[in-house]
Image: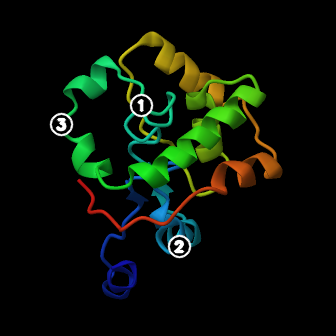
Amino acid sequence: MQNIAEKHGWTKFVSLQPQYNLIYREEEREIMPLCQDRKMAVVPWSPLAGGRCAHSWGTVTERNKIDEVSPMVWGTTEKEDKVVVDNLEQVAKEHGRSMAQESLAWMLSKPYITAPIVGATEVKHIEEAVAALDVKLGEDEIKRLEAPYMPHVKTGDF
């Protein structure tokens, strides 16, 4: 679509809003490199995977008690996702950070990310997101966070 728009003098896309987080990284293969090459903004939704990358696996929160959307998005990959979340929890503990800070710092380490859409239901969620801006992860830490990822069936965007 970018090439067609350019060929016809039409307005090109300037941004993309994909689902992207430690447990769903399918856009890394094609879309993220394209956005980086075309200098398009990337504004991911669900950077904490509906809270899954903010708490120990299986934590029950007020949000997930009433959340009817997340099961449609995350419903079939629990085994694979649990491994990623357990690893995230371990790495965050080792560095004295919350899982949310660690996960957001990982996302912000990617050169193609412009600004994640962070959902917040408490002031501490905003504080953790802001604190993640000051976290600079080393290459080894990034590799460790990414290592347990298992490819997912590509989901549709909502």
Q: Amino acid at mark 2?
A: Arg
Pick out the residue farthest to the front.
Answer: 79
Rounded to the nearest angstrom, the CA distance separating label 1 from label 3 is 16 Å
N-terminal-most mark, 2 or 3: 2
The residue at the point 47 percent across, 33 percent down is: 57
The residue at the point 77 percent across, 46 percent down is: 141
**Does residue 36 sit above or below 20 in this rendering?**
below
Q: Amino acid at mark 1?
A: Gly
**Where in the figure is residue 2, as x and y percent of width and height?**
38, 78
What secondary structure is found at the residue carrying circle 1?
Answer: loop
Along the horizontal axis of the image, is 28 left or right of 153? right
N-terminal-most mark, 1 or 2: 2
> Is residue 50 something that shows in the picture?
yes
Q: In the image shown, does 84 or 48 lie closer to the viewer?
A: 84
Q: Which residue is mark 2?
A: 29
**For residue 46, which quarter of the picture?**
top left
**Where in the figure is residue 60, as x and y percent of width and height?**
36, 23
**Where in the figure is residue 51, as x and y percent of width and height?**
41, 32
Q: In the image shown, does 40 or 18 lie closer to the viewer?
A: 18
The numbered mark at residue 68 is: 3
Q: Which residue is mark 1?
A: 58
**Where in the figure is residue 114, as x and y percent of width and height?**
53, 48
Pick out the residue farthest to the top.
Answer: 123
What secondary structure is found at the residue carrying circle 2?
Answer: loop
Which label sits in the foreground, 1 or 3?
A: 1
N-terminal-most mark, 1 or 3: 1
Which label sits in the foreground, 1 or 2?
A: 1
Which quarter shows the N terminus? bottom left
**Does residue 48 sit above or below 73 in this rendering?**
above
Colouring used for the render: rainbow
